[in-house]
Image: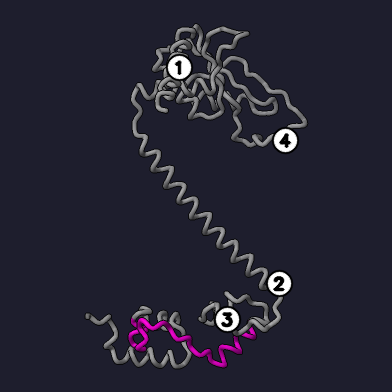
Amino acid sequence: MTKLRHVDDAELVSKIHAMRESGATYAQIKTELQVGASTISRVLGVYGKGRRRPTISDDVRARALALRREGQSVPEIARELGIAKSSAWAITKEVAWKPTPGSKERAKRAARMRWDRETARRAEEREQAVSEAAAWVGELSDRELMLIGAVLYWAEGSKTKPWNPTEWLGFINSDPDVILLYRAWLRRLGVADERLTFRVHIHESADVQAAERYWADVVGVSVDRFARATLKKHNPKTVRKNTSEGYYGCLVICARKGAAEYRRMDGMWRGICRAVRQIQ
């Protein structure tokens, strides 16, 4: 059998024995000498027999008791003295302990650090998942765009009702990417830009002109193309959260004489529904 590295190093063997006899733990020996636990066990002749718990020196015991009386927790004592938490607990279990202001603050800092690390890990994990999903999409074919647009319109656009059977295309949304998708879908449907009307729908306390400039830039038209904005009246009972400088309300896009395109949308939506039912 091939011996592990370091086992035949006389100087290393001597150091391991000396540290173990002085009460050093496996963790302390590993850190100090940069060797593995199996190497330590082979040197000590206990490989495969389980570890012998080291005898804790009187100095370590005294220091552990003092730290406990100062209000430090068992994990803190174990880290500072380089011993196992079980050993730290066994030494200090008889000490009446109450958290001091200092220990409470240390605990809070440790909790914040753990939460910050967890938050960063989750953010990285989420970003990776989102990036992979975005890369999976790739380029959209014309057919895919038509189907996506039909679903989007059915979810967000104006639709006929039994009491109002008028067929027309009207769409409102506050997300610029959704607006751009809708515009691309209209072009694919063959709706000429000249048939479109634009209008901002926004709270009366907002900057209407700034909102119109913003949406005009998004859709690539002049502000002169915009109809008079629709202002939403203020309700004192409503606690509004969209009050920042980046609030631009919603953009309303309507297509004149859009009955034919509406029927195509309706047909595509029905086809999607029929295909979904067949999947089951």
Residue 79 locus on image (x, y percent): 53, 77
Instruction: Say few, some or many: other residues with alpha carbon within 10 Å of mark 3 (under 14 / 14 to 19 / 20 or more).
Output: many
What is the three-letter code of the residue carrying label 1? Arg
Label placed on residue 239: 4
Residue 99 locus on image (x, y percent): 70, 73
The earlier-in-sequence mark between 1 and 3 is: 3
- Please give left or right for residue 144 compared with residue 223 in the image: left
The earlier-in-sequence mark between 2 and 1 is: 2
Residue under label 2: 101
Q: Nearer the viewer, mark 1 or mark 3?
A: 1
Residue 169 locus on image (x, y percent): 51, 13
What is the three-letter code of the residue carrying label 4? Val
The earlier-in-sequence mark between 4 and 2 is: 2
Instruction: Say few, some or many: other residues with alpha carbon within 10 Å of mark 1 (under 14 / 14 to 19 / 20 or more).
Output: few
Residue under label 3: 88
Query: Which element carries disc 4, helix, strand or loop?
Result: loop
For the N terminus, the quadrant is bottom left
Query: Which element carries disc 2, helix, strand or loop?
Result: helix
Please tell me which residue lies in front, 256 or 148.
148
Please tell me which residue lies in front, 9 or 238.
9
Tell me if label 1 and label 3 are in contact, CB under 8 Å: no
Residue under label 1: 270
Instruction: Say few, some or many: other residues with alpha carbon within 10 Å of mark 2 (under 14 / 14 to 19 / 20 or more).
Output: few
